[in-house]
Image (tube, rainbow, N blue to C red):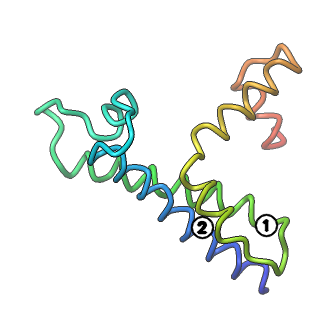
């Protein structure tokens, strides 16, 4: 049971890491205009509610990836790892998929289906 509790904490910490990354982009502390434009588009046709949902979705994915990375850790909560995973999850996911692509000529859709056991 404690393993799930630690993973839930890691998910919250990972979500906070994703929010920290978005904040750094939004306030210009780091450069990433392309990423920021996808998360918080400047197009006036997209209202603030839709933009906020994009940021929340970004945070949820960061938390989910941190949750998954925490599961094998067992009883040892790794908060720094969860924060970093939450911050860098797009890079981690793309590297995993790219590595799998290099190992196998399957499409990414087929790889995901294979990971899900379909």
Residue that appears at 69% across and 82% down: 5
**In the orientation shown, which residue stands out farthest toward the bottom?**
1
Instruction: For the N terminus, give its image quadrant.
Output: bottom right
Which secondary structure lies at badge 2?
helix
Q: CA distance from mark 2 to mark 1?
A: 10 Å
Residue 109 figure quarter? top right
Question: Within 10 Å of the Cα at label 2, are there few (<14), some (14-19), or many (20+) other Cα atoms?
Answer: many
Q: Quadrant of residue 103?
A: top right
Point out which mark residue 37 bears: none
Residue 114: x and y, percent? 83, 34
Q: Residue at horizontal 79%, vertical 67%?
A: 71
Q: Which residue is more in the foreground, 95 or 61?
A: 95
Say which residue label 2 marks: 11
**Who is closer to the viewer here, 36 or 5?**
36
Say above or below: 65 vs 26.
below
Instruction: Measuring from the top left, give residue 86's x and y in whole percent.
Output: 57, 56
**Residue at numbered disc 1:** 71
């Amino acid at each position: 049971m404690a393993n799930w509790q630690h993973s839930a904490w890691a998910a919250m910490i990972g979500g906070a890491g994703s929010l920290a990354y978005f904040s750094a982009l939004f306030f210009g502390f780091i450069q990433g205009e392309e990423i920021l434009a996808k998360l918080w588009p400047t197009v006036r046709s997209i209202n603030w509610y839709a933009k906020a949902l994009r940021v929340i979705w970004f945070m949820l994915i960061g938390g989910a990836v941190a949750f998954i990375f925490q599961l094998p850790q067992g009883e040892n909560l790794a908060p720094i790892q969860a924060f970093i995973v939450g911050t860098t999850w797009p890079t981690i996911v793309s590297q995993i998929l790219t590595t799998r692509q290099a190992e196998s000529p399957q499409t990414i859709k087929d790889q995901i289906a294979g990971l899900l056991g379909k």
